[in-house]
Image (cartoon, grey):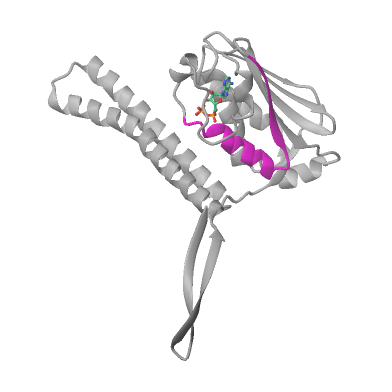
Amino acid sequence: VIQVYSEPLKRNGEKFGTVIVHRDITKEYEVDVMKSEFVSTVSHELRTPLASVLGFTELMLNKELKPERQKKYLTTIYKEAKRLTVLINDFLDVQRMEAGKQSYDKKYDDIVPLLSSIIEAHEINHPNHVFHFQTKTTHTMVLGDKDKLTQVFTNLINNAIKYSPDGGNIYVTVYEEESQLKVAIKDEGLGIPEESIDKLFSKFYRVDNSDYRKIGGTGLGLAIVKEIMKQHDGDISIQSKLKEGSTFTVNFPLVIGYSDEERGKNGNL
Ligand code: ADP
């Protein structure tokens, strides 16, 4: 995209020529397009849960309802309001990430207790999935921001639950490979079409087929995970087979020789 503008050249108030400036504004243009796409997606995504909150509230206000029905509607309102909160938090995170305004408070600590507590919370809320947690290395220290890493694992475990059937196994494994500390989250779910794998980390990208469309989401979770891992000098990779399941593996630089004494001093994960 080229912006062109002209400026008259004057000497003693007399015009004697013109300067024509061609400026390549492709980058600015692309950022503008991205921003307006973002705003329209955000508005669209917020509208659905809001409509549901308003609809059910109106129903409750205008009708005499039996207590069971009231409870049912209130549960829906609560769920939708919660979904709105998640959406808004995701949108804000992406915005901050893009503006380079996310701050990271990194400390050395053990990743295993953090993972255990996240898995435990999910076990309680999702009794229809079977969780397996295994640690295969003693080098389980990372230099990390506790809240951001919680977000990474919560997103990945939530996806494993969301995109796999009830009764499915979810395996979380901590291991060491090629001088890296890795955490793999494996599910027995829908799997990902090969042509989609590279696109999963793009903002708003969601696999577009009938199995997936029924499942709600923003397509922002993995973009956030990817950025957080980058900020930890790590990365994330995917192995997946359609209809068999997926494994999302995050990796961190290996921390070796971190003593228990220092762990006590600094530990905060
Ligand atoms: P969301 O789940 O909100 O759509 P994400 O960024 O977390 O957004 O994921 C992007 C897309 O990647 C999802 O819409 C889904 O199509 C696919 N995906 C993510 N995790 C899994 C998984 N464990 N199994 C199958 N597909 C997945």
Q: Is residue 73 above or below residue 154?
A: above
Residue 187 visible in image: no
x, y percent for residue 260? 80, 40
Magenta span contains residue 159: no
Q: Which residues are magenta?
A: 218-241
Q: Residue at x 43, y 17 (%)?
A: 214
Find ligand 1 in the image and state its quadrant.
top right
The quarter of the image holding the C terminus is top right
Between 168 and 212, the one nearer to me in the picture: 212
Name the residue at the top extreme: 167
Quadrant of the rendered image containing residue 268: top right
Of all residues, the one furthest to the front in this rendering is 16
Which quadrant of the view contains residue 186? top right
- Pick out the residue farthest to the bottom: 12
Would residue 76 be found to the left or right of residue 152 on screen? left
Q: Residue at x 59, y 40 (%)?
A: 147
Q: Give how far across and how far down residue 25 sits, in percent.
A: 53, 56
Q: Position of residue 205 (x, y in %)?
A: 52, 30
The residue nearer to you, when weighing 208 against 218, is: 208
* Residue pictured at 52% horizontal, 11% vertical: 128
Q: Is residue 186 above or below residue 39?
A: above
Q: Is residue 228 magenta?
A: yes
Spot occupied by residue 75 in the image (x, y as percentages of width and height): 32, 23
